[in-house]
Amino acid sequence: MSVGDPPADIDIQARPTSSFRQAYAHSIVGTAVIAAMGVCSGVLTARLLGPVARGQLAMLMLLPSLTIRIGNLGLTQAIAHLINPVRCGGRAVGPNAIVLALLLGCAECCIGIPLLDVALPNLPAYDRSAALILMLLVPATYVIYVLIGVDLGHGRFLRYSLYQALPVVLYVPILLALALAGKTTARTFALANLWAWLLVVGVRAPEALHLLLSGPVRIGDISRILISGFNLALPELAGLALLRMDYPILVRMVPADELGYYAVALAVGAGQSATANPVAQVCFHATSSATDRRDGLEMLAGQFRLLQPVFLLITIGSMLVVPFLIKVAFGTQFLKSTTTAYWLIAAMSLWSCSQVLDHGLRGLGRGRLAAWSNIMGLGLILSAGPLLVARFGITGMGAAMCLAQAVSLAAKLLLLNRGNTVRATDFWGLNRPTLMRIVTHLGIVWRSRVHTQHHTAQ
């Protein structure tokens, strides 16, 4: 089968879920639950604490959140990548991963605690003890990252999505219980986040202990996981810089009201990430499970072709409702954000496609290729962004973001074309065979649901 042909359904190796369709469904549902609970917790904390205490809560959570975001070194994907039977090679990944998570988490705690006064100079003295306790989030989170990495590596997307969402789901009832008890302070709400994560650690503690005792712990295997995680984290950090470089440029060049308009446009444009992130994780597992690079590239090309029309439809639908959405959700005073929102929606559509390739390339062990392409896009933002902002304001930044994501995506496709058996055109999905395959999949899903309902009625 050539890469350009529409591939048949491919079951991903060593997974209880039997198809990409189930994997996508579980991942998207998990992401939707996380987003919904995030909105609930955000509304609750804002309404119950007020602006001052909400700011103190953000201050308390800053250091552990930042440490986890930067310091996890791609732990989840490294475990998922290495624990596959294709790459495990008989070495016990699980026990070494648990030890690495504890060592890494405790080391970052020891480094972060002395930096508390530097990172949070305005932290009140009575909140200092809470800030110190909250650093326990780092090792607790890393242990959970290892366990969901094991789930992802074995293709257990239902468990992966469930335990990824569980801390956020538990956080909301804990907040409500504290509100009913009259304990509505920034300190108690921050510690509630720690309690939620520790509850999840408690639920999965037997599993973590079993994993720890399942094999020998070796320095060489720990180093192997660490190096793999670092290589997988490189494109993520470069992509994060590309995605977030707009604000550092804008805060120096536009007034506060223009920055507010841009924030609204970005909130409208970023909605597509709820679809892109979960499907990208599925593509990571699919390519990581491939027996050889050609199979992985074929799998990545097939899924990339299928997802392009989906992302395009989401983009068109988002653009059609932009003026109405801004008017209803944010008010008529923010209608100046409309043009910038169009550019950012287009940018996020390109970013969604790029994320699929990013994660697929990481699964194939080609993370550096993804990192270099993101760095190329970042270079365009840094060079063209200030010029376009000076000429067109926030609309110029929207255009620069769109161009940068286009450059990053094009670079991935062109770099894939070098030294591989695939062509950039093999990844083009806006064609009749791909659309017919999507229609066929939808027909299968519809007939399956009708049959299930009929069987239930009988």
Image: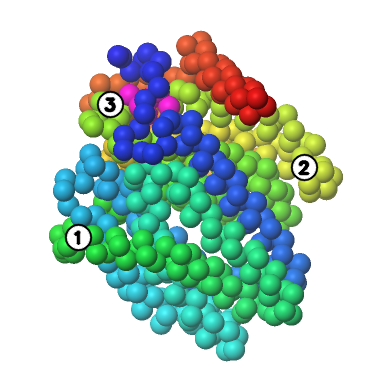
Q: Amino acid at mark 3?
A: Asp
Q: Secondary structure at mark 2?
A: helix
Please state the total of marks drawn on the protein image.
3
Residue on which disc 2 sits: 326
Residue on which disc 3 sits: 295
Q: Secondary structure at mark 1?
A: loop
Q: Is residue 316 visible?
A: no
Instruction: Answer whether labels 3 and 2 touch (C-beta < 8 Å).
Output: no
Q: Position of residue 269 (x, y in %)?
A: 63, 41
User: Residue at coordinates 38% horizontally, 46% vertically from top-left?
Assistant: 152
Q: Residue furthest right?
A: 332
User: Main SS type for the magenta part?
Assistant: helix
Q: Secondary structure at mark 3?
A: helix
Q: Position of residue 14 (x, y in %)?
A: 31, 38
Q: Earlier in the sequence, mark 1 or mark 3?
A: 1
Q: Is residue 67 left or right of residue 335?
A: left
Between 457 and 177, the one nearer to me in the picture: 457
Residue on which disc 1 sits: 215
Asked which quadrant contains residue 126, the reply is: bottom right
Q: Earlier in the sequence, mark 3 or mark 2?
A: 3
Q: Amino acid at mark 2?
A: Ile
The segment highlighted magenta reads 298-303
Between 330 and 449, the one nearer to me in the picture: 449
